[in-house]
Amino acid sequence: MNRGRNALASWLLTVGFSYLYLGEFLGHRVEGQIAASSELGVASLVLLSSGISVIMTVRWARSSGKADENLETASPRRRFLLALLGSAGGLVATLAAALFPNRRWGSVTGSKIFLVRPPYKADLARDEWGGSKVTGYRRLGRTGAFVSDISLGSGSSTGGRQTLEVAREAIDRGINYFDTAPDYSEAGSENRLGEAMKGRRDKMFVATKFCLPHGHLGPGTSVEGYTNAVEGSLERLQTDWVDLIHVHSCNSVERLLDENVHEAFDRLKEAGKVRFLGVSTHTPNLEEVANAAIESDRFDVMMLAYHFGAWPALSDIIDRAAARDIGIVGMKVLRGSQHHFLDWSPDERDSFTQASFKWVLSNPGVSCLVISLWESGQLDEFLYASGQSLRPQDVAVLERYQELTSDSHCRPHCGLCLDGCSEGLPIHDILRHRMYFENFGAQKEAMRLYASLDQGAEVCGSCDAPCRSSCPSGIAIPERMRDAHEMLSASPGRSLG
Ligand code: SF4
Ligand code: SF4
């Protein structure tokens, strides 16, 4: 009887491990993220635990009936069946426990998954791109640092794909500016960059954000809350200081000028733990936030969503920032990265990323751009554009891209339609998460981000859509929102975080 209880306890433990760890591991594998060694470790633990449970089940079955004097030992056939059924039941429960945290995938049909294309690199690598290195370095405003014009970014949707090897190779190829944040891949990005920089920290200019691995720091955060967050980043990055700390994804002047964040920065700077202050923003309030940052004269760097076709006021902001010697870092430079989906020639498609980079860097007010990458081939392709001038044929490709995508690309800093939604939905955020899913191949992360929103697009299905004509670019908001919900949500609700 004891053997039976032990076998049961072992299976319960195995099912618990499977639910807690194997589910996450499977989710990351399905999404295409590289499994961290710790995740492989827990997967092995579940396998080991399953094996032990099977052995205990077999031992229990073999002794079946022996504990009761009044019973004869069960027949070999019965013992075999008991062992088989007990083990099979345990294994099925273990598998179900691993699948349960990924049940959102139930609403993602095969066709949607296969819509997702590989990373945003060219279909055909060209010989001349092989081994490209950074050839352009630019001054990052008043920081005085000279940084690689094409630099390594990370991101909530793609950070989990970066590998240690590629980050090291990026350094070898001349990238000296890393942008990361605690919430990119839930601290995975900082951990990896910390490993990659070992022994080369002095060569690198490292930017991270006031943030925690599981979310942003909002209004009301204490000075200690901010300083502790930076201490966590320093630990993960395995360094004594970061060069630049951004107010992360800043969506309001209130957050930008929060006294506590500035007090925390001053204390950290005095202690030699941070050097410069920045702000990153791609909010609909970008203009207001960026103008306030320039006027405050507190910020050394601004990281802005900037790409071909950005609205004219953004160029004006960059000019005024440059006049105050504020460094500008461009992000989201691929304008939604839809080039793989367009009906155009392979040459046009494969020249899109380099043309986009050259256009961003053609603005002398821009110090560098950051781009997520996780394959050596992307380094070849992307760095081939370093130090290069914009050519007429590049502009032609970008104009064609704009023409083909104007009714499907939701600009990250826009928000002009938000007042047109009777439900107050964050249309720009929902369509951005859809973009992560469809264009960046980060399905699970997009679903997680969508699930974390206070409001989703489930109401769009029964709404009479007063938002219909509120997008100046002609985006069919109601339809794209309904599709976004179907794509990003668990069926039938959004209850999973
Ligand atoms: S849907 Fe159109 S108006 Fe709304 S945020 Fe996107 S680009 Fe701007
Ligand atoms: S259809 Fe959706 S986005 Fe449009 S007004 Fe209704 S709830 Fe808002």
Image: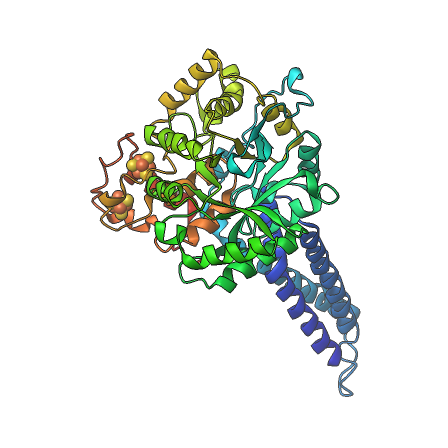
Q: Is residue 475 left or right of residue 107?
A: left
Q: Quadrant of ligand 1?
A: top left
- Residue 206 seen by the camera: yes
Q: Is residue 282 shown above or below 256?
A: above
The residue at the point 71 percent across, 66 percent down is 81
Q: Is residue 496 left or right of residue 36?
A: left
Instruction: Look at the image and tell me in which quarter the N terminus lies.
Output: bottom right
Q: Is residue 404 left or right of residue 17?
A: left
Q: Is residue 213 shown above or below 246?
A: below
Residue 311, percent from left and from top: 34, 29
Q: How many marks?
A: 0
The residue at the point 58 percent across, 21 percent down is 387
Residue 154, percent from left and from top: 56, 41
Q: Residue farthest to the bottom?
A: 69
Q: Is residue 222 left or right of residue 373?
A: left
Closer to us: 86 or 484: 484
Residue 283, percent from left and from top: 37, 43
Query: Splitting the image into 4 quarters, where does residue 320 fall?
Result: top left
Residue 14, percent from left and from top: 67, 65
The residue at the point 35 percent across, 49 percent down is 253
What colouring does the structure picture have?
rainbow
Closer to us: 80 or 384: 384
Q: Is residue 121 shown above or below 435?
A: above
Q: Residue farthest to the top?
A: 392
Closer to us: 166 or 293: 293
- Residue 497 seen by the camera: no
